[in-house]
Structure formats: C-alpha cells, structure tokens
Amino acid sequence: MTVPPIPARGSASVAATPGGQGRGLSWLAVPALLFFVAFAVIPLFGVFALSFTTWDGLGEIRLSGLDSWKAVLSDPGLPHALWVTFLVIALSWAVQTPASLLLGTFLAGFQRYRAVLAVLYFIPLLLSSAAIAITFKALLDPNFGLGAGLGIPILVQDWLGRPVLAFGVVIFVVSWQFIPFHSLLYQGGVRQIPRSMYEAAELDGAGRIRMFFSITLPQLKYTIITSSTLMVVGSLVFFDLIFVLTAGGPGDATRVLAVEMYKRGFMANLMGPASAIAVILVLVGLALALLLRRLGGRDQTHSQLEGA
Amino acid sequence: MGLPLGAALAACGSSGPTQTGAGGGGGTGGTGGGAGKATYWYLTGQPNEGVRTRAVERFNKANPNGQLATTTFQNDAFKAKIKTAIGAGEAPTIIWGWGGGGLRSYVQAGQVDDLTSWFDENAAYKDRLFPSSFGAATVDGKIYAVPVETVTPIVLYYNKKIFDKVGAQAPQEWGDIMDLVKKFNAAGIAPFSLGGQSRWTNMMWLEFLFDRIGGTEVFQAIYDGEKDAWNNPASIDALTKMQELIKANGFVKGFSTITADSNADQALLYTGKAAMMLHGGWTYGSMKTDGGDFVTGGNLGYMNFPPVAGGKGDPSNTVGNPAQYMSISSKATAEEKEIAKKFLLTEMNADAQSKDWVGITQVPIVKGIDAQFGTGEDAPWQKFVYDTAANAKSFQQSWDQALSPTAAEVLLDNIAKLFQLSVTPQQFAKNLNEVIGK
C-alpha cells in the first residue's frame, strides 16, 4: 500500500530550502527506485510484450501480433468486466466515503471513549482479505451461517447465489474492510484543522452541523481527494477478497477486471489475452488517477492549511 | 520477455511447501550422498499424505544410491506451482497430476516423456491395473503417465434415516428422482444437497445425465473436438432435464452460496437437512469423521447413478477420478529418470502401498485388491467402490480434468449459469461449441 500523501505542515519549508541540499539527498531515492524498476516497470514491459504473444504458460512463447488483443476486445466478457469494475468502484466509493468521513470526524475528538472505539474500529484493518472472505462466506451460509444460527429468517438468503445480492455482499465486505483505513486518514485530516477556526465559528454562533459543512468538509478537500484516489485505484485492482468470496460468481456477476485477468491467465492458460487485460487495467488506473489529481488541482488557494 | 514474469511467479507460489531431502525420516537414509536424486512433489492432507510419505520412505531405504527428494504442497498451491514450474523448465522429475486435459497440455509442450514402450517392457505391471485408469493417461494413442494411487467414482449418497421417515425407496431411474423431489419437498426436507458455488459439483450431475441419456459417445465427440458436438439432441435433453430438476426445487435452497470446500454440502446430508447428495467417493471418509455416528450407525446409503428411461447409456458406467497420474519430466537427466522409473515400478501400485491405501478406506487401482478388504465396518463401502470401478463399461474422467484448461474454464462458467437458469440449454451448447478443441 502506498503511503497517502497527507499534507504535512513542514513540507513548505523543505521545498523552500535552496536547491543544493535537496540535490544532495536525492540518492536516498535510489533503493526505492531500484525496487520500483525491478518489480514494477520491468514486469510491466514484460506483460506488454506478452500481450502480443500466444503462450499457455507451459510451452514456447510465440509471437502472434494482435491476436490476443483482438480476442480480448471482441469478447463480450470485457465490457461486462469493465462495467462490473466500474460499479464496484462507484458503489464502494459512495458507501465508504460518507461513512469514513463521519467516523473520522467523530474519532478526531480527544475523548477517551472515542480512543477505545477507534481501536475497535481498526480491527478489520488487521485481518487479511482472504481470512475476511472465508469468514463472511461461513457467516453467510444459508444452512449453517449466521441467519440459521441465530434463527433470523431475513439473514437466510442465497447471498452469493443471486447476482444482485452477491454484488451487495461484495460492496459490504469491501467497505467493512476498508472504512477503518479511510477513517484513519480523515481522523488525521480533521486533527490538522486549526482549532481557531472552530472557535471563531462558535463565536459567530455556528452550530455543529454548520461547522461540519462550512469548516471541516472544505478543509478536508485534499484528504478527500487522497482517500478517493486510494479507493478508486484500490477497487480497480481489487482481487483477493472477491476471488475468495465469490470467485467472480454467480456466473459472472461479480467478475471484475482483475478476476477476469486471473481466470484467463492462470485457470484457462491464456497468458496473451490475460496480459492484454493487465495492460488495460494499468491504463484505466493511470487515467483515473490523473483524472482525480486534476479534479483536486484546480484551485490551490481553497485550503487554509500551510503547505497544502 | 516472459522470463521476468515467469521467474517472479515461480518465486511467489511458496505458500508453505515443505522440503525434505532424500532419506529424510527414512531411518538409515542419508547415506546416499553423492548419488543422484530425483525430485517428486506431492499433496498434503492426511490421511493420503501419510501413504505417499511412507512410500517414499520405503523407497529411499531400499535404494541408498538413487534417492527421491520430495516437496509437499497444499492442493491449490500445487496446481498453480506445478504449471509455473513446468513452464519455467523447473519441473520435478515425477510430475503428479490428474491426467486428461492437463496432461495433454504438457504433452503438447513436449514436457513429459512417452511411456508406451516402458509399459510394453513391463506388461505384467500394466495388466495388474484397472484398464479404465489408462484412458486419462493416453494422449493420441500413446501413454504419457502411470496411473497410480486410488479410484474415486462419483456416487449417489442418501440418508437412510430420512428415507425411512418419509417412507421412500432409493430411486431406480430418473423418474423416481423427480417423484422423490416432490415427496421430500412436501415433507419439508431438501431433496438434494449441493455445494453449487464450487461449480464442479454441478458438473457431476451433467456428467451422469449425458452418459445415461446419450451414452459415452456424446462426451467422447466433445473430447475429440467434433464440431458443434454439444448440439447433440442427447446433450440438449440432458441439459433440459437438469433445469427441470432445478426448477422443481430439487436442490437445497441457496445452493449457489454453498461451497464444497467447507464440506457444508456433506453436513446437509448427515444432519438430515437434505435427503440425497451426488458427490465424490472421497466424501465417505470425511462424513465418517465429521458426521458423528451417521456412517458408523449405518445411516449412509450409496448407489450408482440410476438410469434414465429410454436412455442409451449403460447403467454400469460411472464418472469421477479413475486414478491419479505420474509422468516423467522430459527435462530430467537420464539418471533422475532411471530413479523415477524404478520408484514407479517397485513402489507405486505395489502391495505395501496398496495395503496402506486400503487401511485408510480407499480403493487402490489394482485388480483383485478386494480380497484385502476384510470384514471391517468400511469393507462394504470399499467393496461397492471396487465393484463400481471394476464393472464399469466406461469410467468417464471428470470433464474439467479431461478437457483443456481453456475449455474447462468456459465449461464451469456456463454450468454455473445453467444452474442459475440464466442460460438456456441451447445457449449453453452454443457457448461451449465455440471452445471445442481449444
């Protein structure tokens, strides 16, 4: 996971120091750069090259021009997977953002009970996606799961067997897992807002809700953009949880691009088309990240935070 | 350019494999230093793992100059790892697998040795094994793998207690099944248990229906890559009957949410929530362990899949795993290959190992092994499995293993949709015709 670029107070002064010092320290980036080149850039070129070949993972790799691309682009599975991926991105953003914003604001208070709650809220963050998926699968079992165990008929559903329900379950579990992380971002963001602004607003007679919408929310603009970028790009490559929970099913109802890629490459032994999908994933991810940056980049003056 | 990817993948499949040097645990082993070592990977999971481990131990003890070094993997990790290792030229000397389409892809890539002449030299060895086990080892008339280990047909299980309670008889043909569905639904019991999320569980139903209605030729034509073979009227009839059973609520509610890997489908049968279940022979052992006194109390009934009235298939035919398979990597050195062949000849399918399999209620693929079943509580079950396998006119390998991985993925996908009733039999056939021979 990348470190979220939370605007730091001191960043303005670092940037302001004369260029000499900054240049002297640039070698510090070398190890990270080496890893990035070895494990991200080179494989990326490898995948790009593979997308112009035919390979079953076993035999020879044969150049086959645009065959893989034609196969992928003409397959109705691709627009479907893109649409499902888009839905996962949009819905998980729409569920997670308000929830983690409110939770983060709530947890930014310094009361002791909130600190206790904060620890509880962060527990899902400590669990691996595979473990979460297996646990939810067991809980959702219609005959031996939560509904049957507690005798609550409404919880006894064909949760992973109906497309709409299965999709809802995926969004719910993804949100359950990641809201804590984004709450943490917002908590940090809210704590950076100068107290003086709230004091001034209080003097002017603003209520809590007014303060939230007029101070907290605008001041969190960059945190929202950071968190949204992480959510969007994160949901785009979302794989492990969905793969264990539904394996893209029922049918192809929850088959996002990443699952589609895995199935083609490692289950159907079609490495060429799988690589083409991987390239598409990278392009879509880049486009989305750039778009989000641009959305946030327009008016730098809006935030009152130093260095933001 | 595929190299960085392949290398990276080969490095990441290591979800806890355990390496044992040659002679590990073999008592007097370890004296074979300097001698060549062949490599062999196998699956974890007791009790089968123990049988495999003991076989290697016996071999290494008897052959200090040509030892086997083993690595063990959990099932899913193995499937991913072996493929990548073979692709990267790092395959073990002995390649363990399920035969069929997977083996065919190794053969096409020139990764495994032709063993036909080896079997000719060792005709007596070959004659001892179930003939039905060789189908999945044969590609284009040549044998590329040695059938080993055990036979596990798919079996129709039923809960005798529930049958007595409702006053029902075991089904004699497909019509009885449809009647039983009505009867059990009226009694508030799910007729059939099914772990539908796993998809291959649904596939077992189609394997039997295709065979009983159209005989073995229907799938054989698909396997042989005949154009539009899924459009066979028998195939459409089988798919239609399948959907009729689903529409009649033949399967437990919410079956698409139930997975087979959690054994929840078996639990439905032994807790009496479902009356019947079509499942692999391997579930007998787990139901015996997990089901309290369900199996030991004699409540588990089992039978071969019943015929369909007017169908062409021989009712003795069965489907499932005819055996497991061992091939020899063509990339191994001559010395490694010699050791591996010696292991196959002297240890695999030999008496000591067969006894070991029988001891854990399995049925090895050796003719006449039924003489060793004894009179224990598992003997009737083993006898049933042995007879089913030995008397079967045809033993169809599971479709997803028989077809190429590419076609198998499309098949499983469409089976899930068929069971969701989101494709018609005709659409199903159309989608699958597109991947015939791929």
Image: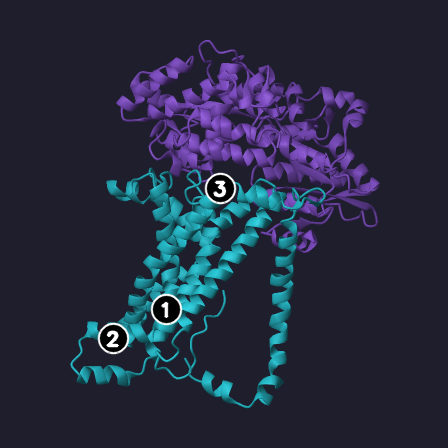
With A268 as the anchor, is B169 left or right in this view?
left
Amino acid at pointer 3: Gly
Amino acid at pointer 2: Ser
Toward the top, the furthest residue is B310
Q: Which mark is residue A224?
A: 1
**Quarter of the view holding residue B184:** top left
The residue labelled by disc 2 is A214
Give above or below for A294 relative to A74: below
Q: Residue at x 53, y 35 (%)?
A: B410
Mark 3 and mark 2 in contact (Cβ < 8 Å)? no
Give above or below for A165 relative to A197: above
**Quarter of the view holding residue B417:** top left
| Mark 2 or 3, nearer chain start | 3
Amino acid at pointer 1: Ile
Per the image, label 1 sits on a secondary structure element best described as: helix
Q: Are marks 2 and 3 on the same chain?
A: yes
The residue labelled by disc 3 is A77
Q: Nearer the viewer, residue A176 or B380?
A: A176
Q: Are marks 2 and 1 on the same chain?
A: yes
Return the chain for callout 2: A
